[in-house]
Amino acid sequence: MKKIILGIGAAALAIVLASCSSEPEKTVFVENDKKLEHDDRVPVKRFWKDPSAVLSNYDKIIISDVRTDLQLEKSWMEHSGASAVIGSEDKDLKELAAYMKNSFTKTIEKGPCRMKLVKDKGPNTVTLELAIVKVVADKPIIAAGTSVGLAVFKPISLCLIPVRSVVSHETHSPMNAYIAIEGKILDSQTGKELVLFATDAQSQGTLLDLNKYTSLYGNVRDIIDKWGAQLVEVINTKPLETGNKAKEIVPGQHNYSIINF
């Protein structure tokens, strides 16, 4: 019976997703997104670099605390995950921001990385500022009853929710983990913007084993870890100066779905 209910819910969700139009989302942390463009040399969706900046002159990097105060609007579908249901979304988001800073820090420290991680502003030093602007958790329409050790499946009557409520902005399937970030690379002394970017990623499968269920953001963390490795790859490759395309490290490279009740 559970398999039948889950199958019906997934089918209804797919129908609604297929019927939703979408518009590109504007940035909320990067002030002027009109100058952001796609560049095949760097593995982000949209990107801008100050033409006068010589990034190879910088050999040190500061990672600021990751911001979560600026959020893109979520559709009802994206907001139907377990984190929203159990009321821990704000807390989980702040913990995810701390995880991102820690993950990037560890990846740079372990290296090899052309830039040295530092805490203080100074010459030849950039500051990396990041903002998580949208997260869709891994497990939609499911809440984990951790206090009693039970999983509670909460189907939503998709047909009763007007499709027009989500057409005003881009909607991503909540059946897989999704995260969008925006970032700035600044000269640490002058505050001059050297690089601006916006990117996102979605896992290629849904991992769900409620017997070992520990985090709403398991697959999102996998994406973050891959982004940290990607940052080091870009720093070392210097694609905008060498012309060599940075190797893309694709988050969530799995095409399976584990659903185990």
Image: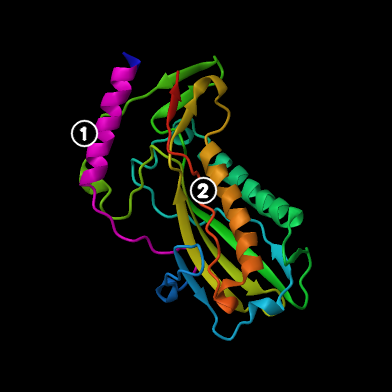
Residue toward you, 110 or 188: 110
Please determine whether, in this image, residue 120 is positioned above or below residue 131: below
Which label number is shown at residue 20?
Answer: none
Determine the secondary structure under disc 2: loop
Q: Quadrant of the C terminus?
A: top left
Q: Which mark is residue 251?
A: 2
Residue nearest the observer in this picture, 69 or 151? 151
Q: Nearer the viewer, mark 2 or mark 1?
A: 2
Compared across the picture, whether 249 is left or right of 174 comes to: right
Residue shown at 55% from the left, 53% from the top: 68
Q: Is residue 247 visible?
A: yes
Which residue is painted at 70% across and 74% down in the image? Answer: 188
Residue 156, image x, y percentages: 30, 29
Magenta-colored stretch includes residue 16 = yes
Q: Can you identify the residue that label 1 sits on?
A: 160
Q: Amino acid at mark 1?
A: Leu
Neighbour tally class for label 1: few under 14, some 14-19, many 20 plus, Cα within 10 Å: few
User: Picture coordinates of residue 145 (x, y %)?
Assistant: 50, 20
Percent position of residue 90, x then y = 54, 42
Q: Residues within 10 Å of mark 2 (few under 14, many from 20)?
A: many
Colouring used for the render: rainbow
Magenta part of the chain: 3-30
Which of the two residues, 232 or 178, is positioned nearer the viewer here? 232
| Quadrant in which the N terminus is drawn | top left
Q: Is residue 217 visible?
A: no
N-terminal of the pair, mark 2 or mark 1, is 1
Provide the secondary structure element on which disc 1 rests. helix
Quarter-wise, where is residue 91 in the image?
Answer: top right
Residue occupying image coordinates x 29% and y 59% = 23
Main secondary-structure element of the magenta-colored stretch = helix
